[in-house]
Image (spheres, rainbow, N blue to C red):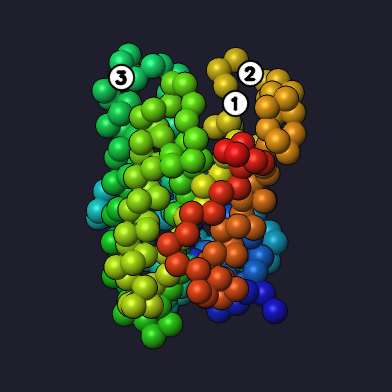
């Protein structure tokens, strides 16, 4: 039996990468999926892929750093499908490459707005809906090993935002578990997405780098990260609250 049959799921940042893979996997396991993001064309492609595999999905344009947009996405999910049972907050940006002292203030504010404020506002809107439902709901936030687990040159600001996601999620999990809302985190390491490519690096270069530096000898796939997300969002993880599940090919060991 698919784990999400009859449930409504919302995925932010669903136009590409991990977010798109999560949205498709939720649909494949029976969920009706609302995909949200800033760019309409990639979202439409995600919905097309969901429908092509026999699932149900709708796209909603949203800037996660705006409270009104976070509320509107939740409202749309409930209006179309009657509930909000699962939310995966995957929207995020990376700005880096410079030492902290040389890091542009504009990039700092951009990362804070999307990576931290975006998760904060999404959590507020999602929890307010889920706690009104008899069955509550489950939320999984996508963080990164560049947070509490490891550090990398030129990524101090990004790491700070991702550490904040984990801390915010753990606090919210404690605040709202008695409301029936279960909140957890997945922290991917280097994954087969465009974000893991270094400037000027090809995919072949990245494969060679992973072989030499990661204990597993390769990057994680988006499907492997997605498997962790779906586990935490499912009833299989009914007693898992406030955890930060690392999927990183051993890179933070």
- How crowded pointer 1 is (Cα within 10 Å; few <14, some 14-19, many 20+) is rated as some
Q: Is the N terminus in the top left, top right, bottom left or bottom right quadrant?
A: bottom right
Q: CA distance from mark 1 to mark 3?
A: 21 Å
Q: Is the C terminus in the top left, top right, bottom left or bottom right quadrant?
A: top right
Q: Which residue is mark 2?
A: 201
Can see residue 3?
yes
Q: Earlier in the sequence, mark 3 or mark 2?
A: 3
Residue 38 is left or right of residue 216, and the answer is left
Q: Residue furthest front?
A: 253
Q: Residue at x 50, y 74 (%)?
A: 239
**In this orientation, which residue lies closer to the viewer: 144 or 57?**
144
| Label 3 SS | loop
Q: CA distance from mark 3 to mark 2?
A: 23 Å
Q: Are marks 2 and 1 in contact (CB under 8 Å)?
A: yes
Label at residue 197: 1
Q: Which residue is mark 3?
A: 104
Image coordinates for residue 17, horizontal then vertical, percent: 58, 43
Image coordinates for residue 62, horizontal then vertical, percent: 36, 50
| Label 2 SS | loop
Q: Is residue 5 above or below residue 10?
A: below
Residue 193 is left or right of residue 123, and the answer is right
**In this orientation, which residue lies closer to the viewer: 156 or 136?**
156
């Amino acid at each position: 039996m698919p784990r999400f049959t009859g449930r409504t799921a919302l995925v932010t940042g669903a136009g590409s990468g991990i977010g798109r893979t999560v949205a498709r996997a939720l649909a494949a396991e029976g969920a009706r999926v609302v995909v949200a993001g800033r760019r309409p064309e990639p979202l439409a492609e995600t919905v097309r892929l969901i429908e092509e595999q026999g699932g149900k999905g709708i796209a909603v344009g949203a800037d996660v750093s705006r409270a009104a947009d976070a509320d509107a996405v939740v409202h749309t999910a409930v209006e179309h499908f009657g509930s909000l049972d699962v939310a995966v907050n995957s929207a995020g940006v990376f700005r880096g490459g410079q030492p902290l002292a040389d890091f542009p203030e504009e990039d700092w504010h951009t990362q804070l707005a999307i990576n931290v404020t975006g998760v904060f506002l999404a959590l507020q809107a999602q929890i307010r809906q889920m706690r009104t439902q008899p069955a509550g709901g489950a939320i999984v936030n996508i963080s990164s090993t560049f947070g509490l687990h490891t550090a990398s040159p030129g990524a101090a600001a990004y790491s700070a935002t991702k550490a904040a996601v984990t801390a915010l999620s753990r606090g919210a999990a404690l605040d709202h578990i008695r409301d029936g809302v279960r909140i957890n985190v997945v922290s991917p390491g280097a994954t087969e997405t465009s974000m893991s490519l270094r400037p000027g690096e090809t995919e072949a270069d990245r494969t060679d780098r992973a072989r030499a530096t990661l204990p597993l000898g390769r990057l994680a796939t988006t499907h492997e990260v997605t498997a962790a997300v779906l586990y935490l969002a499912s009833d299989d993880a009914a007693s898992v609250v406030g955890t930060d599940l690392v999927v990183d090919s051993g890179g933070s060991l």
